[in-house]
């Protein structure tokens, strides 16, 4: 009898316990799945959006060296050139420019065209105006030879400036990955080579073989070699966490208002590799914008073939073939990059700001936003730029803003 009672009580307790478990969902397999759903929900990321600005060539011709307006008590200072544009530079989460010169030091002699060596203070002036990174792979980076090339890289590195396109040693990465508000953006910069028997050359200057690996460059006549190297570097960047990759090529033909065949071919190949955006320089004029789709149809890439001059002395009076003023025009491209709640990163917006280099006789060259300016020359500059990129930018805006 006692055994029967004990058995009944035991069974009752078990039933009550199991009922409680079922009530609170601890033994129900479906409840377990719900618990998993809640866990997934709790690990969703907070969406993040960053903006990256990119501007073209900063190239200091002879007037920037010889005009006393750029010197105070014997020291150079170019900060006035950026007074009207610094607010725009600072509006981006990250700002990039192409610094097309060498910083070989005063002892090497400051000079402009055709062999550039600029006062090092230009780097400080740019940073003080809101620039975060310099592109250094361009056709003038070897204008001061091996020593000037090394001095440029070491000066930037030793003074804490961010740059890419050149390295100070082969142990350093040939690209830059920056964590911008939690999004890891990869930046990589290459320049074109010029034909030269016996090795790598830029601007017909043979690069010493001891430093040749420190310059990112490609031979337009042997692009397959470049593609193999670049694909390997893209993989390295992804393996190191890059969620968005921007390629900055120094390419194309000077003073041509449209991209050339090899620019289009290279853009397509790099889109196929998964590059997210291409923003080019070198032609010294603004060139068109396009949206490129990978051959498998799964990837769309923003491509701006040339940003034009951001700061230079290439006035229409000095370049007969560009008497319409295109060399005075520049553009700042804005990329809006978003990481959504699922951790997916994509381009969700593109826009641009046309710029114009203002200069009255004997005065300071000043970069001014051409959009909204009352100056008739700035208005003409904006009109020229709009006519070149307007159609492509409209298409790009429609494509990428639909991802929001």
Image (cartoon, rainbow, N blue to C red):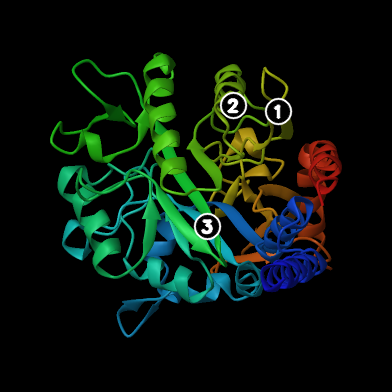
Which callout, 1 or 3, points at the residue further toward the start of the chain? 3
Q: Are marks 3 and 2 in contact (CB under 8 Å)?
A: no
What whole-number distance in Å separates the C-alpha atoms at marks 1 and 2? 8 Å
How far from the left and from the top, in percent, is residue 22? Answer: 79, 63
Q: Is residue 94 above or below residue 138?
A: below
Query: Total of numbered circles in the picture?
Result: 3
What whole-number distance in Å separates the C-alpha atoms at marks 1 and 3? 23 Å
Which of these two is toward me, 183 or 281?
183
Which callout, 1 or 2, points at the residue further toward the start of the chain? 2
Residue 94 as seen in the image, left or right of residue 72: right
Residue 255 as seen in the image, left or right of residue 44: left
Residue name at image x 69 percent, y 53 percent: 342
What whole-number distance in Å separates the C-alpha atoms at marks 3 and 2? 20 Å
Q: Which residue is mark 3?
A: 96
* Residue 401 visible at all: yes
SS at badge 2? helix
> What mark, if any, has residue 292 been given in the picture?
1
Categorize mark 3 by other alpha carbons within 10 Å: few (<14), some (14-19), many (20+): many
Q: Which residue is mark 2?
A: 267
Which of these two is toward me, 150 or 3?
3
Q: Which of the 4 quarters of the picture holds residue 384?
A: top right
- Quarter of the image with the N terminus in it: bottom right
Categorize mark 1 by other alpha carbons within 10 Å: few (<14), some (14-19), many (20+): many
Residue 239 as seen in the image, left or right of residue 109: right
How far from the left and from the top, in percent, is residue 200? Answer: 26, 26
């Amino acid at each position: 009898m006692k055994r029967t009672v004990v058995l009944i009580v035991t069974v009752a307790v078990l039933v009550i316990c199991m009922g409680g478990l079922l009530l609170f969902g601890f033994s129900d397999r479906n409840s377990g799945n719900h618990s998993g759903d809640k866990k997934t929900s709790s690990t969703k990321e907070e969406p993040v959006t960053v903006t990256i600005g990119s501007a073209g060539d900063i190239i200091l011709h002879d007037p920037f060296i010889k005009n006393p307006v750029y010197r105070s008590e014997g020291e150079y200072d170019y900060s006035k050139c950026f007074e009207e544009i610094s607010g725009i530079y600072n509006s981006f989460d990250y700002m990039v420019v192409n610094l097309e010169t060498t910083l070989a030091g005063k002892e090497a002699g400051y000079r402009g065209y055709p062999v550039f060596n600029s006062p090092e203070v230009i780097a400080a002036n740019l940073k003080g105006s809101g620039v975060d990174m310099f592109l250094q792979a361009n056709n003038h980076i070897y204008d001061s030879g091996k020593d000037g090339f090394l001095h440029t890289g070491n000066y930037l590195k030793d003074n804490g400036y961010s740059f890419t396109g050149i390295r100070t040693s082969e142990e350093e990465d040939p690209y830059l990955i920056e964590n911008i508000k939690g999004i890891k953006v990869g930046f990589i910069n290459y320049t074109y080579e010029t034909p030269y028997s016996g090795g790598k050359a830029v601007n017909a200057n043979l690069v010493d073989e001891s430093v040749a690996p420190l310059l990112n460059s490609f031979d337009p006549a042997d692009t397959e070699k470049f593609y193999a190297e670049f694909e390997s570097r893209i993989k390295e960047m992804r393996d190191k966490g890059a969620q968005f990759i921007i390629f900055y090529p120094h390419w194309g033909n000077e003073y041509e208002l449209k991209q050339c065949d090899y620019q289009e071919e290279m853009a397509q190949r790099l889109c196929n590799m998964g590059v997210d955006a291409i923003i080019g320089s070198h032609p010294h004029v603004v060139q068109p914008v396009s949206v490129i789709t990978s051959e498998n149809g799964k990837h769309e890439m923003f491509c701006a073939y040339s940003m034009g001059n951001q700061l230079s002395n290439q006035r229409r009076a000095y370049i007969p073939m560009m008497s319409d003023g295109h060399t005075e025009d520049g553009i700042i491209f804005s990329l809006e990059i978003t990481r959504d709640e699922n951790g997916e990163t994509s381009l969700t917006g593109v826009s641009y700001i046309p710029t114009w280099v203002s200069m009255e006789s004997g005065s300071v060259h000043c970069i001014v936003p051409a959009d909204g300016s009352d100056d008739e020359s700035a208005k003409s500059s904006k009109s020229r730029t709009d006519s070149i990129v307007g159609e492509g930018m409209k298409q790009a805006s429609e494509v990428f803003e639909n991802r929001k």
